[in-house]
Image (cartoon, rainbow, N blue to C red):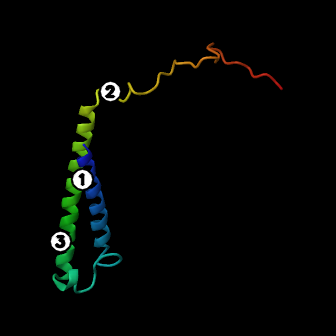
């Protein structure tokens, strides 16, 4: 379970990085310029690569989220409603009557 959470964390960080690198219309935080990735690719090729990497990472992130949700629900025997405290429980020394009490003037 811990390894799945670590993979989910890595995917989340990668997804944020890929989205920030893209930028809007090759401006902002994007790679921009004619070179892109150290001159190995054109600006258009790097944009296509980043959009593909972003889509793949987002898909893996969603799949891992579903897997983590299913594994968490299978491993726990309790329902979320069963884990809530009872409303009818009273502490010792408290007024257990159902009528509201009128506060005394000091």
Dot 3 or dot 2, earlier in sequence? 3
Q: Identify the image quadrant of residue 78.
A: top left
Question: In x, y percent, where is residue 55?
Answer: 20, 61
**On residue 7, which mark appears?**
1
Question: In x, y percent, where is residue 101?
Answer: 70, 18
How many numbered marks have been drawn onto this rendered protein structure? Answer: 3
Q: Identify the image quadrant of residue 28.
A: bottom left
**On residue 49, which mark appears?**
3
Crowd band around label 2 with a 10 angstrom C-alpha radius: few (<14), some (14–19), many (20+): few
Local secondary structure at mark 1 = helix
- Which of pointers 1 and 2 indicates the residue nearer the eye? 1
**Residue at screen point 40% across, 27% down:** 83
Examine the rendered structure and indicate whether residue 47 appears above or below residue 95. Answer: below
Image quarter where the N terminus lies is: top left
Examine the rendered structure and indicate whether residue 10 appears above or below residue 76. Answer: below
Residue farthest to the top, as pictured: 97
Dot 3 or dot 1, earlier in sequence? 1
Residue marked by disc 2: 78
């Amino acid at each position: 379970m811990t390894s799945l959470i670590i993979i989910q964390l890595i995917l989340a960080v990668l997804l944020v990085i890929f989205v920030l690198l893209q930028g809007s219309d090759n401006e902002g935080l994007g790679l921009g310029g004619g070179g892109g990735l150290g001159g190995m690719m054109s600006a258009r090729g790097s944009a296509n690569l980043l959009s593909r990497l972003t889509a793949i990472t987002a898909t893996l992130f969603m799949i891992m989220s579903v897997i983590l949700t299913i594994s968490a629900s299978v491993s726990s025997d309790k329902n979320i409603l069963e884990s809530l405290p009872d409303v009818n429980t009273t502490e010792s020394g408290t007024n257990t009557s159902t009528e509201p009490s009128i506060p005394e003037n000091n």
